Image (tube, coloured by chain):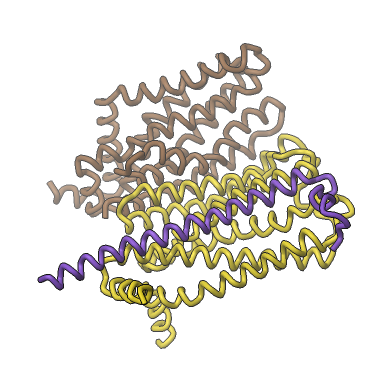
Chain colours: A yellow, B purple, C brown
Amino acid sequence: MAKSRFWLYFSSPKTFYPFSGKLIPWCVGVAAVLMAVGLYMGLLVTPPDYRMGDSYRIIYIHVPAVWMSMIIYMVMAGWAAVGLIWNVKLAEMMAGALAPTGAIFTVIGLWTGALWGRPTWGAYWVWDARLTTYLVMLFLYMGYIALRSAIDDPRRASKASALLAIVGGINVPIIYFSVKWWNTLHQPFTVAPGQESKIDPTMLWTMMIMVIAFWAYTLAVSLIRVRCDILEREKNSSWVAELLQGSSAGNKQ
Amino acid sequence: MIWSSWSEFIEMGGYAGFVWWSYGVTVVFMVGEVVLLSKRKRTIIQRLGRFIRADRSKRNAE
Amino acid sequence: MSESIKNTGLFAAFRLMVARDLTLAMRRRTDVFTTLFFFIIAVTLFPLGVGPEIELLRSMGPGVIWVAALLASMLSLSTLFSGDYEDGTLEQMVIAPHPLSVLVLGKLFAHWLTTGVPLALLSPLLGMQMGLGSAEIQVLLLTLLLGTPVLSLIGSIGAALTLGVRGGGILLSLLILPLFIPVLIFGAGAVDAFTTGVSIDGHLSLLGAFLVLSLVLAPLATSVALRISLE
């Protein structure tokens, strides 16, 4: 009973807004510090890979970006399902706030993957199951964002896009296995993405630091975005009026 | 530090184009997202603040 | 009248829906023909674009015909619910005593009969244009007959979501085309496999599996989407 009340308390935009406001500076701080450490380690400290030379340094941003983009899709579809089934407004807004960041990470993942693939496997792009499915995930993100912004009524927009996110999520594994099958039929693959050489422990640590930094970045950016959405949707409520009056009065001092 | 000179760092063992294009585009995207978002937040707060002040002065006048 | 509808069984409701939509399609024959002509034109453009070498055309043929069929059925989907949405029939369907998914399934069956089946029946002609042999054409026809209902079923989710949305048609393609990929792979892949002498049983069973899966899930998802759009 107490537990359900706890969740109810935080699922109300009115209480979530100040709470998330306190959380954001921490996320920004963690992201900034860890990104600085990660970049320093990744570009200046870790030794070159014995096989790939210095081109491998791309993985310090490629791997975290790809991981985050996939995790964000799952979390987004999860929030979308929660919003659709239990009609939780905050979950709907959270799903929408994650999508642009997920799409950006997918673009970064594709771009850095192409630039890493060229020196490593000799091609910017191959029609491998992983790469193709990953590209399709970008299309799903784009469709989600486009549908959400095309519908004017915010409730309908978030519900319709939530259903799309769920349908897309169900399709991702089907697409992956289809492309995999298609690929084995067409030609035996000579270059297999993902077969990394033995990784040095400092390299692994650097990558983990970057992963945590990207997590913190995602959290910060999506919280800022969801706060913007909250303000826009709740602009007629009294708590927003009080909040903004307080902040503008505070600024004038 | 594994690099002995600045130019060696820039060269990235012959992979300068790949490494710097990756990092550059990533930085542009992530910084761009943050800049656009903070701009959006500022305009929302300004716009809503204006609405609320207008609303309050109207109510005071009544 | 409402009493008589309430007393009709599920299957009768399904049949009434199919009959109604077929009648409507017959009254608006040009819509059907537009889709078919789009299909023919799209396929015809390819030889003009890549050159008339028969070997090249033969190897590209199944893929080109399948992609064109995909695009043609996607174009026809944008009108799937829009007529009923504008004249209020859709709201009646939602409040009808029968499950919305059954009515949706009826509409989709009629849609398949008026787009998927004609597309498949036209494909031998286009197959000849692309230099395919008669055995390959038969496989192509079979895969199109198995695959086009899946396209209608998956596409109906997107059609329902984009109802009354500005830029709905182009948005629909963005939402739906990525989800068509598995059908395209196994549909066109079956003909390719047949040409190279590989057994096509796997392709056909997977297409059948997609059909069964989408028959079960898509009408449910579409009715949820319709309810969201009508709220």
Res. A84 visible in picture? no
C124 and A9: which is toward the camera = A9
Of A104 and C98, nearer the camera is A104
In front of the other: C31 or C23: C31
**Where the C terminus of chain A falls, by quadrant?**
bottom left
- In this rendering, position of residue C230 left or right of residue C72: left
Which residue is found at the position 31% from the left and 22% from the top?
Answer: C30
* Above or below, comparing residue A79 to residue A126 in the picture: below
Q: Residue at x 67, y 31 (%)?
A: C193
Is there any visible trace of residue B23 in the rendered image? yes
Q: How many marks?
A: 0
- Give the residue drawn at x 74%, y 49%: B19
Q: Quarter-wise, where is residue A40 in the image?
A: bottom right
Q: Nearer the viewer, residue A122 or C25?
A: A122
Quarter of the image containing the N terminus of chain A?
Answer: bottom left
Q: Position of residue A169 (x, y in %)?
A: 52, 54
Q: Position of residue C112 (x, y in %)?
A: 40, 34
**Going 47% across and 31% down the picture, which residue do you hit?**
C71
Residue C171, horizontal then vertical, whole percent: 41, 41
User: Residue at the left extreme?
Assistant: B62
**What percent of the width, then of the height, locates residue C165?**
32, 44
- Residue C215, placed above or below residue A63: above
Name the image quarter holding residue A63: bottom right
Above or below C9: residue A3: below
The vertical placement of A50 against C12, above or below, is below
Is residue A121 found left or right of C71 in the rendered image?
right
